Image (spheres, grey):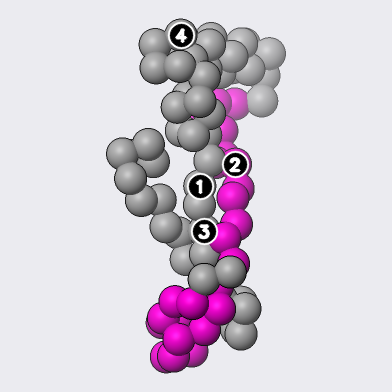
């Protein structure tokens, strides 16, 4: 755990990292799921599987005092 400033608490508190999958931009039908698969496959071929999988997640930090969750996608891999 890391010590960071919490905007809600107004003080330095312990924060825990939380990784969540981004919601799909595709629909639920078979056709949309197939498009999602092809998009992921082509991204994996183009940039490699590790970078392609990073594009599918969001990184949050959560305050252990109040539970405030803040999105922190830093770095080029999250852009």
For residue 60, the mark is 3
Bounds of the magenta segment: 3-27
- Residue at screen point 44% across, 90% down: 11
**Would you call the spot at circle 2 few (<14 residues within 10 Å), some (14-19), or many (20 or more)?**
few
How far apart are labels 4 and 1 at the CA level? 22 Å
Q: Mark 1 points at which residue?
A: 58
Lower sequence index among marks 4 and 1: 4
Q: How far apart are marks 4 and 2 (CA)?
A: 20 Å
Measure how far apart labels 2 and 1 are at the Cα level. 6 Å
- Mark 3, residues whose alpha carbon is within 10 Å: few (<14), some, or many (≥20)? some
SS label for mark 1: strand
What residue is shown with label 2?
21
- For image coordinates 45% across by 59% down, the residue present is 71
Tag 4's secondary structure?
Answer: helix
Disc 4 target residue: 45
Magenta-colored stretch includes residue 36: no
Q: Quadrant of the C terminus?
A: top left
The answer to whether the residues at label 2 and label 1 have Cβ atoms under 8 Å apart is yes
């Amino acid at each position: 755990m890391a010590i960071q400033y919490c905007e809600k608490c107004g003080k330095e508190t312990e924060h825990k990292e939380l990784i969540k999958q981004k919601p799909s931009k595709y629909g639920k039908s078979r056709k949309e799921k197939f498009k999602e698969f092809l998009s992921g496959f082509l991204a994996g071929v183009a940039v490699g599987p590790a970078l392609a999988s990073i594009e599918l997640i969001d990184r949050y930090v959560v305050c252990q005092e109040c539970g405030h969750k803040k999105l922190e996608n830093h770095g080029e891999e999250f852009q």
